[in-house]
Image: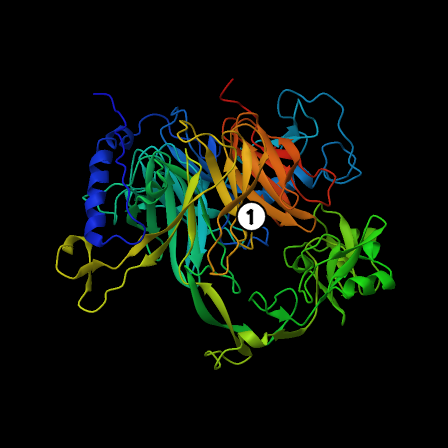
Amino acid sequence: MPCRRPQQPRARRPLGRRNTVQRVALLASVASAIALSTGCWEAATGEAPPTSQLNFPSGLTLDPRVSPDERARWLFVANANSDLVLNASSIVAVDLDAFHAAWQSETLDGDGEPILSGAAKANIAPPDSEVENVRGAGACRRNADRPQLIECLEDPFIEADATVYLTSFATVLRGYASGDKSRLLTPVRGDPSVSYVDIVGGLDGGGVRLQCGQGGDELSPLSCDGAYRLQHLFNDSELARIPLEPANIHVSTGPYHDDVAIVSHFRSPFLTLIDLSDTPVVVDISAELANAGANGGYGLAEWPCSEEAAPSFTRAERDKCVPQSCNTVDGCGVEGVFCGAGVCQAEPSRACSPADDDLCAAEDQLCILEGDMPSCVSAPSVCERDESCGVVGVECALPGGGSCRVPADIDPCDPAQEATAGCGGGETCVLDLVGAPTCVAASCSRDADCGVSGVLCEHASTCAIPQARTCDGDGGCGGGEQCVRGTACGRPLLYAAARELQGAVTFTSERVSAMDSQFCVDPSQLGEAGGLLCEQQLISDDVFAVGGYDVGSNPNFAVTGEMAFAPDGETLYLVQTNPGGLVRIDTSLDDKGRPKNLPAGVVEICAEPNAMTLFADETGEYAAVTCHRPALVFIVELRSFRVISNIIAGTGPHELVYDKPRGFLYVANSLGATISVIDVDNSRATRFTEVARIGLEDPYAS
């Protein structure tokens, strides 16, 4: 009999916690609906995926073991196998160091200049139809249609020995590092399931390896073991299976709550909760989106708690130890605790006259020039970095002066480059982002004095704790430390958007604790009087309308896509898929400490957008949104809330990730078997341009 997808059960429940017996009874109905569908996807016959190629790339993530402020060597890519020509999905590891060295450290034109340098010349000769040996390895060429675009074969840059196989229709890819665990997670629509893979090695110059119990299948030795595939509640095949069409996943980690992951499903109002505190395990399947009347979801996000702001629903006071001494690079590790005190001041080119400075100062504001006209702006009284001032044209200066500190990931010059740079006494020669030798000053009073992106002005000082945040005691802090009191999220505040409705829900997760005559049991012991599953559970909070372009009350198409918070938590951005828009939602806290969750605007973008990532630099805050059908990436400047660029990408762009240290976006072109490399660095003339591509365009649609 041919396989058919069963109808998913729909359930509504009041806000708040449901008891364990009710929850397990509801999950039994989910299991009966899903069990009919599992046989269609278990067997995989046919040709195995190549270990060093892209095939319907559907998910991307940078190495989660590396700080977002440092250069990650590895980009992990999930290949979906969407046409089922092969017998599996796969995860591959791309060596970014090797790729960037190949396409931009040399020249394709023979003029000795790096491709990204201002002196590089365009190659006006018609590109060959095949990859030419333009460089020793012959991996890269100029694109035939757009000679300014460098495209490279993917094979030389993929660590073939790290490749592992999953079942077909892998979706997004997320990574996390917590304690001694470093893993990748991907929902797989075909099973349905969520697969996880451990990351090992690759940080010391050697090759990276992915481990998922592979090797047990003689016919497919690279296939992950079934133990690394989460399909059932408590990983028990006798209990409920997770709902159909797992599509998106959000990982929530933090110092004050257990690590968890939330999975949304295209065709189910249920959300799946995975406990990541040890071996990943599904601990709850709850119909959170039924509270919004939805029958499926996609977008997931988490209100970004800080040491100074946390919603009342999740708030907890915490004492924390910070160092007594510090510098402006390492900081004090806690928001609102400054290392010494920098002062926000106008950049030299935008400085006002002393008289205008005094007029603005009388209003507790700072004066800067807008063109030739003085303007008063609000800025903090103290700062730690330029971005602390929060105003374009205003920088953070250190009155006492400091020294330029060169991070370890910025390469020093060799003797020949030092001679070319001609640095003076006390200056240090380093290679900037495009490999050009540049002199770094010895002393500074602001970051701009150092002259190289990533080199910051630091000074030795002490961490100054505000009086209102001093602890009652020493907080158990050791020598050289001091205690600071702040708020934090004792549990995460999570958001999920309905897929086909203009609504969203908020919820949290919390571990159930036994009280009084209650006691903890495992699933096989449920039914005993007083027995509780002492596991993480989802707890409902609120329902709200997201706004955007009105699509009516019962649309039969996808309405929303990805969502993401601004770093301060005061704004939530949501992609509206039909019609195409980016929705802004006010999530600032009201006087009761609750997020307002009020629609605050929408800007029109391309047709059928879905995926999004946010990034920022000293010139502004941005959203990059992929547009699958027109093959574009739209850039929205978030302060002015307007589209400032639309960028040609490969065929079928979808997931994307921001590489902050290098200043690039990587975009998975799902229908072109490539990854676009888009320049977003404001110091380069190629900003907001696709400058390179991993893989040669081979559209499946043609």
Q: Residue at x 67, y 74 (%)?
A: 461
Instruction: Determine the image quadrant of residue 141.
Output: top right
Residue 265 horizontal/vertical position (percent): 36, 38
Is 111 placed left or right of 662 in the picture?
Answer: right
**Element carrying mark 1:** loop
Where 477 sits versus 142, above or below? Answer: below
* Residue underneath mark 1: 73
Where 508 sits versus 513, above or below? Answer: above
Q: Residue at x 31, y 29 (%)?
A: 44
In the image shown, does 390 or 125 lie closer to the viewer?
390
Q: Residue at x 75, y 22 (%)?
A: 125
Is 142 placed left or right of 201 in the picture?
Answer: right
Instruction: Determine the image quadrant of residue 624.
Output: top right
Q: Is residue 676 visible?
A: yes
Residue 518 horizontal/vertical position (percent): 19, 65
Q: How many marks?
A: 1
Q: Is residue 61 visible?
A: no
| Residue situated furthest left in the rendering | 528
In the image shown, does 100 or 404 lie closer to the viewer?
404
